Amino acid sequence: MTTTTTLARAALALAVLLTLGAGAARVEGDATRGKSIYARYAGCHAIARNRVGPRHAGLFGRAAGSLEDYAYSGAMKDWGLVWDAATLDRFLADPRGVVPGTKMGFAGIKDAAERADLIAYLAEATAP
Ligand code: HEM
């Protein structure tokens, strides 16, 4: 085997290892933990009905501020994004920084793993 072939094989093996490693390092939320985090805010939100905040049923794929029977802030209605794992993660990290003028009076969740757990729960619990 030539030195070039050996080097090429080593580079390929390294690329495969890095790819596998990146996959293993991806944060997967724990929906059970997420459920108990969500329960802390039961005074503000429920899945099935509007409380202080809008209901979360059908959240994924819904445009922000789009329920007809909930009185959103203008800021939320004008935000123009659709809820998915990425937009929820951004918003929940810093609600008032990400949607200035929102009436969601909540400082957010700074811990990325807690947000991942919560989003994993919401993905399950809000599915139609
Ligand atoms: C884990 C905690 C929370 C999550 C996952 C969450 C999630 C959300 C989401 C996704 C929206 C936008 C929904 C839509 O566009 O239909 C929203 C809005 C809202 N939430 Fe929360 N929220 C949380 C905590 C809270 C808390 C603690 C309060 C009360 C103090 C609250 C009050 C509100 C209000 C009033 C809105 C309407 C915002 C506006 O129109 O500007 N939320 N929430």
Image: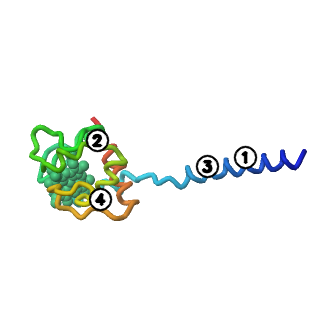
User: In the picture, residue 95 is in which quadrant?
Assistant: bottom left
Q: Amino acid at mark 1?
A: Leu
Q: Secondary structure at mark 3?
A: helix
Marked residue nearer the N-terminal end (1 or 3)? 1
Residue 84 is situated, as x and y percent measured from the top left of the image, at: 33, 43
Determine which residue is flagged by label 3.
20
Above-or-below relation of 125 to 22: above
Residue at the image point whose x is 18% and y is 44% from the top: 65
> Mark 4 or 1, which is nearer the eye?
1
Residue 63 is situated, as x and y percent measured from the top left of the image, at: 24, 39
CB of mark 4 within 8 Å of CB of mark 1? no
Q: CA distance from mark 4 to mark 2?
A: 23 Å
Marked residue nearer the N-terminal end (2 or 1)? 1
Q: Residues within 10 Å of mark 4 (few under 14, many from 20)?
A: some
Q: Secondary structure at mark 1?
A: helix
Q: Nearer the viewer, residue 11 or 85?
A: 11
Marked residue nearer the N-terminal end (4 or 2)? 4
Residue 44 is situated, as x and y percent measured from the top left of the image, at: 16, 56
Q: Amino acid at mark 2?
A: Val
